[in-house]
Amino acid sequence: MKKILVTGAFGQIGSELVPVLREKYGKENVIAMGHITSPTPRLEEGPIVFGDVVHKEDLDKMIRKFDIDTVYHLAAIISAKGELNPQIAYKINMTGLYNVLELAREHALERIVVPSSMAVFGPDAPQDNTPTDTILHPTTMYGMTKVAGELLGSYYFSKYGIDVRGVRYPGILSSETPPTAGTTDYATAVFYDGIRTRKYECFLKEDTTLPMMYMCDAIKALMDLAEAPLKNLKHHTDFNVAAMSFSPKEIFTELKKYLPDLQISYKPDYRQAIADSWPRSLDDSAAHEEWGWKHSIDLPTMVKDLYEKLSARLEK
Ligand SMILES: NC(=O)c1ccc[n+]([C@@H]2O[C@H](COP(=O)([O-])OP(=O)(O)OC[C@H]3O[C@@H](n4cnc5c(N)ncnc54)[C@H](O)[C@@H]3O)[C@@H](O)[C@H]2O)c1
């Protein structure tokens, strides 16, 4: 039976990935590791630990104590927060991943799953249908740590035989945790402000098209890749995965079907430059060919589901 440690488990993705992993592998076999924030009530239904991924001994202790063989390494400082504090982003993203990979080598762990991001691309990559294999010249610290992380993961695979796998996520929308630190967070924040006040000020321009994905597809992507037969994989740590692309104006128009009196204003800030350096759409044919990836949720379905879940919660 697998014994899984999830770092960054109390964040946006971890809060929804951990319950799905627990359903599949058993509650006691999925250890949710948090840092300084509080877990959602659902996470408290199984084992929870606290630690800092920058401190290798914290991770070492947990791997030994729970006899871990697989790590989903989600702890990171993401795009917008990383640009506000690049030094912290470097330390947590690079040292955290290095510690996980070194412990995988020392304990001969079975598998490391680590999400990358479309932030690996910079302004000189093709912006439409950006391929998995292309120029990687990111302009953000976050993007640089993700490129280095992909390369490190591939190095540990070829040098030490550690099975490291990862997808490049687009922006992810979800209902479980409020948006905090991402450049694509406007797309979720509009639901919170819109439902509460019928007003939203967007920090990106109305026509800034970016690749996006609903959380259930994001979880499916990571778990499907984690389970794929190794012999089928030519890539390992750097699969583009795609679902939809839209601009602020397009998602706001969709949301206005449920909130017709929603008022939108635009005040682009430092996050506009980050968004402008990223692709408009991603080519995920490598993921499709090597492990059968296919998304299932489109924009109208996602907006309906998010609206129903968040309005039920926020209007209480
Ligand atoms: N959410 C997205 O849209 C998105 C898009 C692309 C890639 N990703 C990637 O997916 C992964 C998870 O992202 P997320 O959206 O859940 O991020 P998040 O910011 O919601 O969660 C990250 C978690 O890491 C924890 N953390 C920070 N520093 C830590 C430390 N020193 N030790 C231990 N934990 C620490 C934080 O407390 C937080 O709970 C990251 O690798 C991120 O780069 C996310």
Image: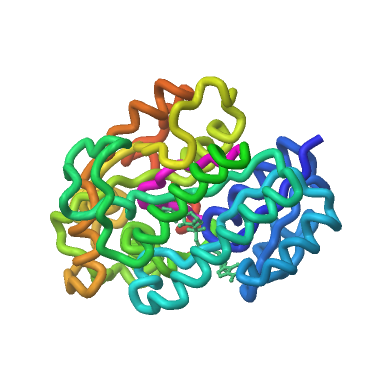
Colour scheme in the image?
rainbow
Residue ID at (24%, 39%): 130
Image coordinates of residue 215 in percent, x first then y, are: 48, 46
Judge by depth and name the residue closer to the eye, 279 or 23: 279
Visible residue check, residue 261: yes
Residue 144 on the magenta segment: no
**x, y (%) of residue 298?**
35, 36
Task: In the rendered view, tell whether residue 288 sits above or below residue 90.
Answer: above
Towards the viewer: 69 or 258: 69
Q: Is residue 172 magenta?
A: yes
Residue 135, located in which quarter of the rendered image? Answer: top left
Identify which residue is drawn at 47% across, 67% down. 77
State the residue at coordinates (49%, 24%): 291
User: In this view, which residue lies farthest toward the front?
Assistant: 159
Instruction: Give the magenta part as a residue range.
Output: 163-175
Q: Is residue 246 above or below residue 204?
A: above
Quadrant of res 208: bottom left
In which quarter of the view is residue 8 placed? bottom right
Question: Which quadrant is home to the N terminus?
Answer: top right
Is 19 placed left or right of 287 in the picture? Answer: right
Q: Quadrant of the C terminus?
A: bottom right
Q: Is residue 3 left or right of residue 270?
A: right
Of residue 314 and residue 42, the one placed in the foreground of this image is 42
Residue 304 in view (yes/no): no
**Residue at horizontal 28%, vertical 33%?**
283
Q: Position of residue 39 (x, y in %)?
A: 66, 66
Question: In this picture, is 58 found above or below 137?
Answer: below
Vertical arrangement, residue 236 with respect to residue 201, above or below: above
Q: Main secondary structure of the magenta part?
A: strand
Q: Nearer the viewer, residue 3 or 174?
A: 3
> Could you say where residue 97 lies in the image, as x and y percent from the top left?
56, 58
21 lies left or right of 151: right
